[in-house]
Image: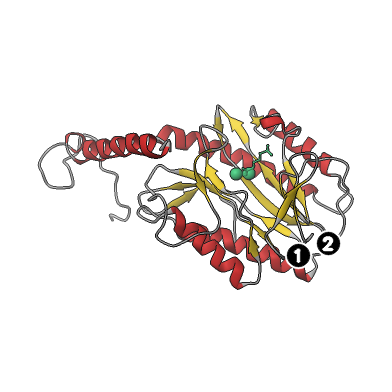
Amino acid sequence: METKARKVGRNDPCPCGSGLKYKKCCLDKGRSDFLRLKEKYLQDYTIPLKEKEDIEAIRMAGRLALDTLRLVEEHIRPGIITDEINTLVHDFTIKHGAIPAPLNYRGFPKSVCVSVNEVICHGIPGDRVLKEGDIVNVDVTPILNGYYADTSKTYFVGKPGADAHKLVKVTRECLKAGMDMIHPGSRIGDIGWAIQEHAESNGCSVVREFVGHGVGLDFHEAPQIPHYGQQGKGIVLVPGMVFTIEPMINLGKKGLHILDDNWTAVTNDNSLSAQFEQTILVTENGLESLTPYDLDEPLPNI
Ligand code: MF3
Ligand code: CO
Ligand code: CO
């Protein structure tokens, strides 16, 4: 019984019916189309489209990133100090032959960003003690064999309050809404539009100062991926693009300021802020998350 579509081999007859070997016909055309696009995206936008080998390497970094988040999740509870999360992430990353990208990145002093409650992003681990009802975003980026994967989640510390529960739910849905827009032919503006629409229709606001970004060969590559914007605007998505979506959503207004440490971004109105981030590959059919975690798992009860 023939159940699974078989992959066409390089030396098989081309499925287009030309009578030529696949490698001399459409396989070659697919490859040369890709190489033309790769050249164009680099020239026009400085976007490095990724090859199969690059993608496999980023996927491996992504697996390590998710293992790191899982380890952290096991330790999140009232009483844990944010610097203990840094130690967990740092030691686990090194133990697996990788480097924590945040450490010394533009002077960032720690190996992970830990952002609590009104901190939007780039929280520096220190002596803050997490307490019941807090929310905390943990953002990890290992460099494995020279390749980067960037992912974060917002966790509840103990039992969530109603506000925290609502914000985290809406923010996770925003990442999903952005991902749902991704396929070859859609545009960067479609992603931001979908996120903004979902956040604002739920009475929340979208942070403008920090955006998603190309990632893989470097920490922050072109293009920028704003979490707000207009449908049909911006660069066309093509297979081989790898970038993050990482909406930062506030329960109150969108304004922010940076603390004297030059990193910690905090809401002006002291309202709660949450974030979820995955590293996404645009494929021929749609997308593949290279840092896949479940965006539908039930949230704890209030
Ligand atoms: N991980 C963050 C991002 O999603 C960047 C952190 S930069 C650091 O882009 F220096 F603060 F680590
Ligand atoms: Co990022
Ligand atoms: Co990140």
SS of the residue under disc 1? helix
Q: Quadrant of residue 198?
A: bottom right
Where residue 279 appears, x then y in whole percent? 54, 46
Where residue 69 appears, x then y in whole percent? 69, 45
Q: Residues within 10 Å of mark 1 (few under 14, many from 20)?
A: many
Where residue 202 appears, x then y in whole percent? 63, 72
User: Which residue is at a point 24% across and 35% down the rendered structure image?
Assistant: 10
- Give the vertical position of 165 relative to 2 (above or below): below
* Image quadrant containing the C terminus: bottom right
**Ligand 3 within 8 Å, label 2 CB:** no
Q: Quadrant of ligand 1?
A: top right
Where residue 12 appears, x then y in whole percent? 19, 38
> Relative to residue 278, is residue 46 drawn left or right?
left
SS of the residue under disc 2? loop
Looking at the image, tell me whether mark 1 or mark 2 is earlier in sequence order: 2
**Circle 1 sits on which residue?**
164
Q: Nearer the viewer, residue 180 or 272?
A: 272
- Give the vertical position of 195 relative to 114 (above or below): below
Q: Hey, what amino acid is under mark 2? A: Gly
User: Which residue is at a point 40% across and 49% down the rendered structure image?
Assistant: 235
**Circle 2 sits on which residue?**
133
Q: CA distance from mark 1 to mark 2?
A: 8 Å
> Relative to residue 155, is residue 152 drawn left or right?
left
Q: Hey, what amino acid is under mark 1? A: Ala
* Image quadrant containing the N terminus: bottom left
